[in-house]
Image: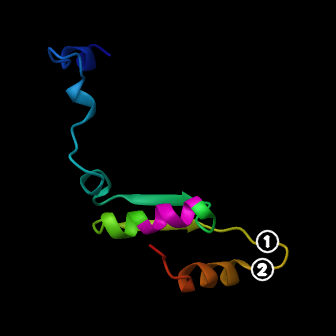
Amino acid sequence: MDIINKETNENGTNEGLNKTNSLEEFYSGSGILVTGATGFVGKGLLEKLIRMCPRIAAIFILIRPKTNETIEQRFKKLTDDPVRI
């Protein structure tokens, strides 16, 4: 706590919390676990990570089966669905 407080500048902002310049730098070389990747927000998050952070080491996706679809079917549907901008 004291280290963070020492880095506060004259404007009152804390520069210690913003050491990385971008998401790409923050996630570079990292492995990420995404739950809910087949949902609306999960698809957007997954697309953003793939597009903006090419140096991510691995993205792990946790998919559960539903009553009428297997994990493989849900994964295929996720990968076959185009991203609409």
**Which residue sits furthest left?**
10
What x and y, as percent, mark residue 13? Answer: 24, 22
Figure quadrant of residue 48: bottom left
Drawn side of residue 44 relative to residue 72, left or right:
left
Label number found at residue 69: 2
Residue 45 within the magenta-colored segment of the rendering: yes
Q: Is residue 17 above or below residue 82?
A: above
- Of residue 40 and residue 5, the one placed in the foreground of this image is 40
What x and y, as percent, mark residue 40? Answer: 61, 63
Task: Report if the CB atoms under discs 2 and 1 are less than 8 Å apart.
Answer: yes
- Of residue 68 and residue 32, the one placed in the foreground of this image is 68
Q: Which residues are magenta?
A: 41-47
What x and y, as percent, mark residue 34? Answer: 53, 60
Amino acid at the residue labelled 1: Lys
- Main SS, magenta region, reads helix
Q: Is residue 21 above or below residue 19?
A: below
Residue 73 within the magenta-colored segment of the rendering: no
Q: Circle 1 sits in a helix, a strand or a loop, which is it?
A: loop
Disc 1 marks which residue? Answer: 66
